[in-house]
């Protein structure tokens, strides 16, 4: 759908004002992973949501220039790993804040595959192993819809979770 259902005046908020407002919203932090012919890839994301439980379906929004996005689209699979509160370093690594790239990003924590073969973080709060079922372009991002084909994460009840708020990672 490209046209608004109910057109409004065209004066939109400034991008900087919108980003400032969104910075006040706490969001769970996830590492979205995949595997392709050239190896594993991943990125840190907060734009993740459940879509349905029948069938189990989730979505993630990823900027179009992302290298990981290209691997996900080519492979047709991805895993959303929800991070525990003590995984600040992992969030920063996959957000390209530590200068670690490619396969080296996976060397600091324990990963295992589930159904699709995408990397699943062993101590994730929850992990949603997905088959890519739909892609939608919206503004600067692509919305990836995935049918959940496997679940993972820590078997024990998680302690804290990692969130992103006020432009920083925080455990709650």
Image (cartoon, rainbow, N blue to C red):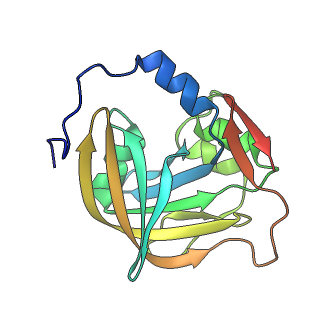
Of residues 2 and 29, which is closer to you in this image? 2
Q: Which of the 4 image quarters holds residue 159?
A: bottom right
Residue 114 x/y as whole percent:
53, 76
Task: Answer with the quarter of the image where residue 132 lies.
Answer: bottom left
Q: Is residue 8 visible?
A: yes
Q: Where does the image place residue 121, in percent across and percent down from the top left?
A: 65, 62
Q: Residue furthest right?
A: 159
Q: Is residue 115 visible?
A: no
* Apparent side of residue 122 relative to residue 73 in the rendered image (left or right): right
Give the tally of numbered discs: 0
| 12 relative to 154 in the view: left or right | left
Give the answer, above or below, for where 11 lies relative to 39: above
Where 170 sits versus 41, above or below? above
Q: Please indicate whether residue 58 sits to the left or right of residue 124 in the image.
A: left
Q: Nearer the viewer, residue 81 or 121?
A: 81
Q: Residue at x 38, y 56 (%)?
A: 36
With 61 as the anchor, is 142 left or right in this view?
left
Q: Is residue 70 above or below residue 36?
A: above
Q: Residue at x 56, y 77 (%)?
A: 151
Q: Quadrant of residue 4?
A: top left
| Depth order, front residue of 134/114 | 134
Q: Position of residue 70 (x, y in %)?
A: 32, 45
Q: x, y (%) of residue 146?
A: 37, 66
> What residue is rendered at 39% in x and 21% in y?
13
């Amino acid at each position: 759908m490209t046209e608004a259902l109910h057109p409004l005046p065209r004066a939109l908020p400034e991008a900087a004002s919108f980003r400032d407002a969104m910075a006040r919203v706490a969001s769970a932090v996830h590492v979205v992973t995949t595997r392709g012919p050239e190896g594993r890839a991943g990125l840190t994301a907060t734009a993740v949501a459940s879509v349905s439980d029948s069938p189990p379906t989730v979505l993630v929004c990823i900027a179009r220039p992302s290298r990981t996005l290209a691997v996900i689209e080519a492979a047709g699979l991805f895993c959303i790993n929800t991070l525990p509160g003590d995984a600040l370093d992992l969030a920063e690594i996959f957000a390209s804040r530590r200068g670690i790239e490619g396969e080296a990003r996976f060397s600091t924590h324990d990963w295992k595959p589930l159904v699709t073969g995408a990397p699943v973080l062993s101590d994730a709060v929850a992990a949603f192993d997905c088959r890519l079922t739909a892609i939608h372009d919206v503004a600067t991002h692509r919305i990836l819809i995935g049918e959940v084909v496997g679940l993972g994460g820590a078997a024990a009840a998680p302690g804290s979770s990692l969130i992103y708020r006020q432009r920083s990672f925080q455990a709650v």
